[in-house]
Amino acid sequence: MSKKKRKPPDDVKLNLAAMLDMAFQLLTFFILTFKPAPVEGQVELRLPPPAPVTGAVGGAKAGADDKNTDVTESLDSLIISVFSRPSGKAATYAIGEGNVDNLGVLQGRLQGIFQDPNSTFKQVIIQVAPALHYSELMNVIDVCTKTKFADGKSLTKLSFVELPGDVPGQ
Amino acid sequence: MSGSGSEGEADLTPVLDMVFQLITFFMLVINFKAASLDMTLKLPVIGSARPVDMKGTTELLILNINKEGKINVYGIPHDAQPYIKGEAMSSLLKAKLEKPTLKLGDELPTMVVLRADGVTTFNLLYNVIKLCQDNGYRRFAMRAMNRDE
């Protein structure tokens, strides 16, 4: 009986075609789901619910609170008003009761007010016409956030109030 | 003389290597959160908008507000009031895990990201802000583009 000689096994060749096919499938998935993120910035604000402007408790009689030595403590808000055209673009601005022509003048006035070391204003309340566009509002917020106090700190306390009025088309 | 014709087999190893390089690149840059951003909205352009830095912020509520004042969620407009209320309940339940004494109406740690179209009127935007405030949200981030595209 002759023993059959076994041939030494040939080199095992790995077929990469299947692996490459799977890799292409994965690549196609990631290419199709790739979505470049837009370059967006943001302005961070802390907006608590509206509170009374004065420090007096509702219904309290004048002089009733012995501990309250500064009734005007809460009256340190600078009020900026933004009025709009029917198209939604900003028409005029106002700081308190004084009109301001444009954003450049508004920025200059704000800077003058807050840079004054004797200024007591700590926050800004923006009264906005209901028809004003979001882009116009962001321009005003942009101006406010660029304003700095006399000590170099930026103005961060902002809040919004809606002016009475109608919105054309709504 | 017969020449043994060896079949020309392309070596697939470099091709596979390049494909894996590409896959690794796309895996590293994939951003699932970008899917929640509504690209149809044309955000305003302001120069002082700081690049988004969400380090330290645990949770975001992204509100894409369209011209009609509705919230676009993956392309589908939703009414603001029920949507924000639902999200607030969800945020409250998550926040309660860290602070069990929290109750409805208390300040939530979630930051609300407002992405509104540039022509959205203020009254619609303010309505959304008030709804958020009523449901406990205090931190807001108003998104804008750093530069025009």
Image (cartoon, coloured by chain):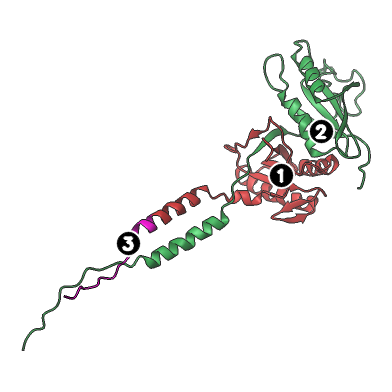
Q: In this figure, which residue is indicated by the disc labeled 2? A: A160
Label disc, if present, on residue B11 of the rendered structure: 3
Callouts 3 and 1 close, C-beta under 8 Å: no
Say whether disc 3 or disc 1 marks the residue closer to the N-terminus: 3
Where's residue B18, x and y in %?
40, 54
Residue B19 x/y as whole percent: 43, 56
Q: Could you tell me which secondary element the residue under label 3 belongs to? A: loop
The dot on residue B103 is 1
Q: Nearer the viewer, residue A84 or B5?
A: B5
Mark 2, other Cα within 10 Å: few <14 / some 14–19 / many ≥20 = some
**Quadrant placement of the N terminus of chain A:** bottom left
Kindly identify the amino acid type of the residue bearing the numbered disc 2.
Phe
**Residue A126 location, quadrant:** top right
Q: Disc 2 versus disc 3: distance between alpha carbons?
A: 67 Å
Mark 3 closeness class: few <14, some 14–19, many ≥20 residues within 10 Å: few
Shade representing chain B: red
Which amino acid type is shown beneath numbered disc 1?
Lys
What segment is highlighted magenta in the picture?
Answer: B1-17
